[in-house]
Amino acid sequence: MTMTSTPVPVSLYGFLTPKTGHAAAFRKLLMDLVEPSRGHEGSLQYHLHEQEDGRFFLYEVWRSQEDLDRHNATPLLRAFLAELPEHLEGAPEVHTGVLRSAHPAGAGS
């Protein structure tokens, strides 16, 4: 008998700081990720926030680590990561975690 494990939602979140003079281009680059990423299999939440200090906060929740890995392997993300150093000041502050609070069924992205 094969037992199937229930996927565990994972989150990815962090702050990204654009280089001086790159805020508009960086904002567009990040915004161009939002809708396509929300359409990827396993995307439960995908949000971009802009802070008053100019940093961007990205918050994603995926149905499973496998879904996040698939998303990260898409041409969309590969192209984004290739352009990232041109616009990013320093290293991104990135965190991952297991979502422990219940995710409401049918909640919007």
Image (cartoon, rainbow, N blue to C red):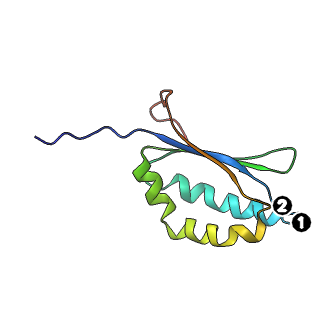
Can residue 59 be seen in the rendering of this structure?
no
Looking at the rendered structure, the kind of residue marked 1 is Gly
Q: Residue furthest top?
A: 101
- Tag of residue 23: 2
Q: Residue at x 50, y 34 (%)?
A: 99
Residue 105 picture quarter = top left
Q: Position of residue 37 (x, y in %)?
A: 55, 56
Q: Is residue 91 left or right of residue 35?
A: right
- Tag of residue 47: none
Q: Position of residue 89 (x, y in %)?
A: 80, 61
Secondary structure at badge 1 equals loop
Looking at the rendered structure, the kind of residue marked 2 is Ala
Secondary structure at badge 2 equals helix
Which residue bears the numbered disc 1? 21
Q: Residue at x 67, y 47 (%)?
A: 14
Residue 29 picture quarter = bottom right
Alpha carbon of mark 2 to alpha carbon of mark 1: how far? 6 Å
Q: Position of residue 33 (x, y in %)?
A: 62, 60
Q: Disc 2, disc 1: CB below 8 Å?
A: yes
Quarter of the rendering occupied by the C terminus? top right
Q: Residue at x 49, y 42 (%)?
A: 10
Quarter of the rendering occupied by the N terminus? top left
Q: Is residue 62 left or right of residue 34?
A: left
Q: Position of residue 64 (x, y in %)?
A: 42, 45
- Name the residue nearer the viewer: 3 or 108: 3
